[in-house]
């Protein structure tokens, strides 16, 4: 992303210098505004708007849009196209005369007189973007409010008791029947991520409609200028190129998260197998099988909270060799929910909601577990597609609003003004409440850990400095060029004979090593450690494994999930179930960062050598 922006600055500078030279030579008397493209496929195209403002008319009635094309080196201007005309004017074949601009402006004014074209906002949109943006935001907010009212009305029609709750089957039918022409049925599936079904499979649609309106607005909104291009043919080419990039990006994303997906499915199958074994044991012992909190807790391999308010994980679990990869068993919705909500799974609440909503159910109300191996990757893909829109839709403004709202609602004492600072624990709470982002546990731990870099001496995080870091991270998460580059690096490392993924031991060996280290620091044998002891244990573990962890960032990331409530206490028996996939994720991230750094140094050296040759 940063490379694209830097390249856009360079190409803009080339065209500005070129046009300034024309001005100095009295070839050009028009004022000009230059806007460079940031996308890779259009990096050689620079948009220029010509106008002649005067003291009497500072906002001319019409302007001319040109597109200047650069050569392959992006250092020289080859020619230009005018407005929507695809004809290319090569500068080595013609001599530029600004009467071309005069004709464009006169033709527009003539069309305006004949009421064939509206030029009211043409100059303002190029010269006063802040006013146009404010007007657009106001219009967008009104549309969002109207959408929320429409959603509420449609769901109320399915609610005969008018108590704000309807059955999920009725809710799903109403959702698909909504008149949203810009949102296909497949794209609407992402809305299920925000649907919380209770144990009776009822949905509180009154709580759903505000976030749904916000999400739909994000999905269908197109920034000013996105739907109006200067050249129809160029727009078609750009769309085709964008579709190809999206397809490649989707495949690259699936390759990047393959390890996370495989681990989750494997763990889920293990939980299914455990439940089947427990049910079989109960039947053989003459005990009746019950589906409730105790059954759900046992199926997770998690004990009830102990006297310290912490949850301890059972050490016993079936061997991986005994777990079926695709069990043929059927489970009820309640049983599936219990497994999905297990603390052993690195799966977000949004993912759980989508799986429960999209899973196929038999006429008898039973769910075949084998389908989850295909459904879960699809859910991750839908969330990634949504995040591509969400993370680039005024994300800085959204983040600032969330932090300010929290600080405003929690002002204490004599504080009259916002300090724009929060405790690390509060930062974590605010981010976890940002349900619109649909962050995965891996994204959550990384983005929370970024705040540790902006803490002051009072252990407060200045979120004004924190937000740009968060925004850059979120942009990179959905930048298709970055995703494709990372997938290419990962594919190359997996093909190599000396794979970097071999240094972390298998999960059973890792658990045994951790139990020994953590147990030595747990003097009271409660299964709980302080945050300081946790960091000490992780340093000792990294030395034992020969895999050094960075205290300032990597261990901080692990602590986000090890201490999800920010209480300063870590339940290491629970954390043991998460450590193996988290270490492999950190190892993958470290490898990708090192490979990108090597590529940048190599590219810098190549450019330096080329400059010396010139």
Image: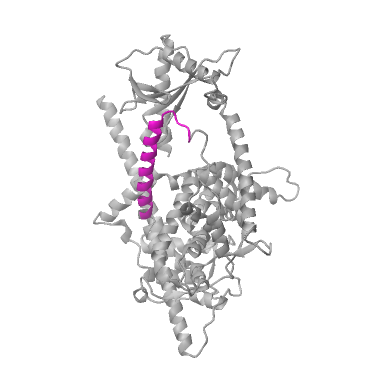
Residue furthest out toward the front:
114
Q: Is residue 232 magenta?
A: yes
Q: Quadrant location of residue 172?
A: bottom right
179 in relation to 295, above or below: above
Q: Nearer the viewer, residue 533 or 392?
A: 392
Q: Quadrant location of residue 607?
A: top left
Question: Considering the image in quadrants, where does the N terminus appear?
Answer: top left
Question: Considering the image in quadrants, where does the C terminus appear?
Answer: top left
Q: Residue at x 27, y 29 (%)?
A: 610
Residue furthest out toward the right:
414
The percent coordinates of residue 505 (x first, y second) are 35, 66
Residue 191 in view? yes
Q: Residue at x 37, y 76 (%)?
A: 319
Q: Is residue 393 magenta?
A: no
The percent coordinates of residue 414 (x first, y second) are 76, 47
Residue 583 in view? no
Q: Residue at x 44, y 77 (%)?
A: 274
The percent coordinates of residue 233 (x first, y second) are 38, 31
- Would residue 374 appear left or right of 348 to someone viewing this image? left
Residue furthest out toward the top:
26
The percent coordinates of residue 548 (x first, y second) are 39, 57
Q: Nearer the viewer, residue 169 or 297?
A: 169
345 in relation to 446, above or below: below
- Would residue 1 appear left or right of 403 to someone viewing this image? left
- Which range is magenta? 227-254
402 in relation to 586, above or below: above
């Amino acid at each position: 992303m940063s490379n694209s922006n830097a390249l856009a600055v360079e190409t803009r500078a080339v065209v500005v210098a070129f046009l300034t030279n024309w001005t100095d030579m009295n070839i050009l008397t028009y004022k000009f505004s230059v806007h460079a493209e940031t996308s890779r496929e259009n990096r050689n195209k620079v948009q220029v708007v010509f106008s002649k403002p005067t003291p009497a008319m500072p906002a001319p009635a019409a302007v001319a849009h040109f597109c200047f094309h650069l050569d392959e080196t992006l250092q020289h201007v080859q020619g230009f196209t005018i407005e929507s005309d695809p004809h290319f004017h090569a500068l080595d074949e013609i001599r530029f005369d600004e009467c071309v601009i005069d004709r464009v402006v006169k033709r527009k004014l003539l069309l305006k007189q004949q009421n064939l074209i509206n030029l009211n906002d043409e100059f303002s949109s190029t010269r006063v973007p802040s006013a146009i943006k404010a007007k657009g935001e106001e219009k967008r907010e009104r549309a969002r409010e109207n959408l929320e009212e429409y959603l509420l009305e449609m769901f109320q029609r399915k609610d005969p008791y008018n108590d704000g709750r309807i059955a999920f089957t009725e809710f799903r039918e109403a959702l698909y029947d909504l008149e949203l022409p810009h949102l296909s049925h497949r794209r609407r599936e992402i809305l299920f991520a925000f649907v919380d079904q209770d144990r009776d499979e009822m949905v509180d649609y009154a709580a759903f409609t505000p976030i749904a309106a916000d999400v739909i607005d994000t999905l269908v909104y197109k920034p000013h200028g996105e739907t109006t291009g200067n050249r129809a043919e160029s727009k078609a080419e750009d769309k085709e190129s964008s579709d190809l990039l999206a397809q490649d990006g989707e495949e690259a994303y699936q390759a990047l998260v393959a390890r996370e997906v495989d681990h989750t499915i494997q763990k889920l199958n293990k939980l299914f197998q455990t439940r089947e074994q427990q049910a079989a044991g109960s039947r053989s012992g003459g005990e009746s099988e019950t589906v409730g909190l105790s059954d759900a807790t046992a199926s997770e391999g998690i004990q009830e909270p102990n006297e310290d308010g912490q949850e301890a994980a059972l050490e016993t679990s079936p061997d991986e060799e005994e777990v079926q990869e695709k069990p043929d068993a059927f489970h009820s919705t309640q049983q599936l929910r219990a497994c999905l909500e297990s603390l052993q799974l690195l799966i977000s609440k949004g993912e759980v909601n989508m799986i429960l909503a999209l899973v196929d159910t038999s006429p008898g109300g039973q769910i075949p577990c084998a389908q989850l191996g295909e459904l879960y990757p699809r859910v991750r893909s839908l969330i990634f597609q949504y995040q591509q829109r969400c993370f680039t839709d005024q994300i800085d403004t959204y983040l600032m609003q969330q932090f300010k709202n929290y600080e405003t609602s929690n002002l204490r004492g004599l504080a009259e003004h916002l300090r724009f600072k929060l405790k690390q624990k509060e930062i974590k709470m605010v981010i976890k409440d940002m349900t619109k982002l649909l962050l995965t546990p891996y994204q959550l731990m990384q983005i929370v850990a970024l705040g540790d870099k902006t803490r002051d001496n009072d252990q407060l995080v200045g979120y004004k400095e924190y937000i740009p870091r968060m925004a850059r991270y979120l942009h990179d998460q959905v930048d298709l060029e970055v995703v494709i580059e990372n997938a290419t690096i990962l594919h190359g490392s997996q093909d190599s004979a000396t794979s970097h993924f071999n240094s972390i031991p298998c999960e059973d060996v890792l658990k045994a090593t951790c139990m020994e280290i953590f147990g030595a620091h747990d003097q009271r044998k409660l299964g709980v450690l302080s945050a300081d002891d946790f960091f000490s244990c992780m340093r000792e573990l990294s030395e034992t494994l020969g895999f050094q962890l960075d205290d300032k960032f990597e261990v901080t990331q692990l602590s986000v999930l090890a201490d999800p409530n920010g209480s300063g206490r870590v339940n290491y028996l629970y954390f043991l179930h998460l450590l193996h996939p988290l270490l492999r994720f950190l190892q993958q991230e470290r490898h990708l960062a090192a490979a990108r750094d090597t590529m940048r140094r190599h590219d810098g050296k190549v450019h330096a050598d080329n400059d010396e040759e010139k």
